[in-house]
Image (cartoon, rainbow, N blue to C red):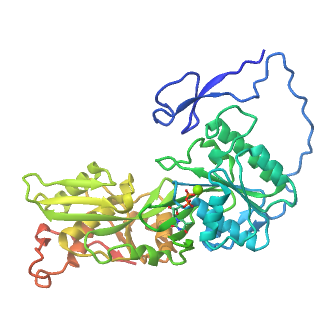
Amino acid sequence: MARNTQTFVCQNCGTTYGRWQGKCDGCGEWNTITEETAGVASAGPGKAPRKGRAFALEPLSGNTQEAPRLACGIAEFDRVTGGGFVRGSVLLVGGDPGIGKSTLLIQTAAMLARAGERVVYISGEEAVAQVRLRADRLGLAQTPVELAAETSVEDIIATLSTGKTPRLVVIDSIQTMWTDTVDSAPGTVTQVRSAAQVLIRFAKRSGACIILVGHVTKDGQIAGPRVVEHMVDAVLSFEGEGAQHFRVLRAVKNRFGPTDEIGVFEMTGGGLAEVANPSQFFLSERDRGTPGTAVFAGIEGTRPLLVEMQALVAPTSLGTPRRAVVGWDPSRLSMVLAVLEAHCGVRLGGHDVYLNVAGGLRIVEPAADLAAAAALVSSLTGASLPADAVYFGEVSLSGIVRPVAQTAARLKEAQKLGFGRAVIPEGAQADSENTGLAVASVSTLQGLVADIAASAPSQAERSPDVPTQNQGIGRAGRSVTRMR
Ligand code: TYD
Ligand code: MG
């Protein structure tokens, strides 16, 4: 007799267990494990396996056509996909709720439909009227996009199989889809995985390109099974700060293109607008020329990311000065402060120190040491750092600035975002060639401190009511920075 085995699956990472438990050992999340029926494929002991069908094998050297691409006409999107949507490919677009995934995809769908392609938009979250309302607002209501509010994958496939094969199908959100072949509720790992499988099979068979929208958990992972990420051809993530208007689309995985390109958009009243010159856009959000800010060229996972580090160093009125940090490791801040005091002659004992990573990001990389130190010294001395410079490098306890991984990727991102120079560890020079940036290498933290202190306004130039702070710097080290 066939037995329906119950398994317990973590809805966050997909780890399976034989019995329920509160915490997932796989990802460490609490209360994410739910009971699921393990599929239908559990053949009973008496059931003979299906007899296989022989298929033709092909030589490796066959004549394969170049994967035909379809550019959607939104340049920032095409840049990220590597030049357009490949026939028969499946893309997963992830992002926080409300970030603009549906907006981006309805705009993309409308662009292609206008160009004469058959485009189908299936919404599992919104009613047809709501999608129409959005399209109306975006001025796209007259485009021939075919629309439906459906959640049954079998019905969707049946519909898509009739008539001309659509060139692009948008499934707004894979988490709302369900298939008859499994009993689990929609949104569970098993359902999402099976529904994705059915859709992927359809894409490969028909040549239609399918874009799946995926929700993201609070720590930025595509919610539900990571396995969907392995099944699809490309995973794009749509990111941005809720309060700010810029949005960044980046490829986390791409079988048909690079993963280090980003697409930058601005959310406007009329939908998403491409930002052709991101540097201008990003720089306009910054307090340029203000002492105490440094741009850090970081890597988030495999993705380069530029963030602004803001420091405020102010004389304290307390017995024990305050050290407050948002978005960075407090013990790393203590370490950088200790190195500044011990090796660079920067006296901070009488100062409160605040450090903030702009935009609410959290940085864990040691490579942020140099940017943090630059922001701190800049705030202390009142010398603003060059607005077009990025900083990265790990600071050792002896004050040596050590190279970090992926120098080239950081510099490429900085260049893409319009920065003109970079202050990097001396040892990292080898792979910094051909980036178009003016690269200044620094071997010790003393060198950086001396350079910043040298550009500080002298006491005479400052207005009398600005209290001078550069008495904080005592013996400054010899400058070892040189421009190439
Ligand atoms: P939406 O595409 O629905 O987000 P997602 O599908 O990722 O959940 O975008 C919703 C947000 O975008 C909403 O907060 C309003 C904003 N928005 C604009 O600012 N301008 C616009 O033209 C549109 C359509 C949305
Ligand atoms: Mg949506």
Task: Give left or right: position of 69 versus 437.
Answer: right
Residue at screen point 68% across, 70% down: 141
Depth check: 205 or 59 in front?
Answer: 205
Depth check, front residue: 416 or 467: 467
How many numbered discs, if any? Answer: 0
Q: Residue at x 75, y 66 (%)?
A: 69
Whole-percent x, y for residue 274 in the image: 56, 74
When the figure is inspected, residue 267 is found, relative to residue 179, above or below; the finding is: below
**In which quadrant will I find the N terminus?**
top right
Could you tell whether 358 is left or right of 177 in the image?
Answer: left
Outermost residue toward the bottom? 461
Quarter of the figure with residue 337: bottom left
Instruction: Give residue 366's position: percent from left, percent from top.
Output: 36, 54
Question: Is residue 296 visible in this depiction of the protein?
Answer: yes
Quadrant, the C terminus: bottom left
The residue at 35%/63% (across/down) is 358
Q: 191 and 350: which one is in front?
A: 191
| Location of residue 135 in the rendering, given as x and y in whole percent from the top left corner | 64, 67
Residue 297 coordinates in the image, percent (x, y): 42, 64
Query: Looking at the image, can residue 400 be seen?
Result: no
Q: Quadrant of residue 3?
A: top right
Q: Nearer the viewer, residue 218 or 258?
A: 218
User: With respect to residue 460, does 315 lie above or below?
Assistant: above
Above-or-below relation of 13 to 123: above
With respect to residue 386, does 241 lie above or below? above
Taking the image in four quarters, ligand 2 sits in the one at: bottom right
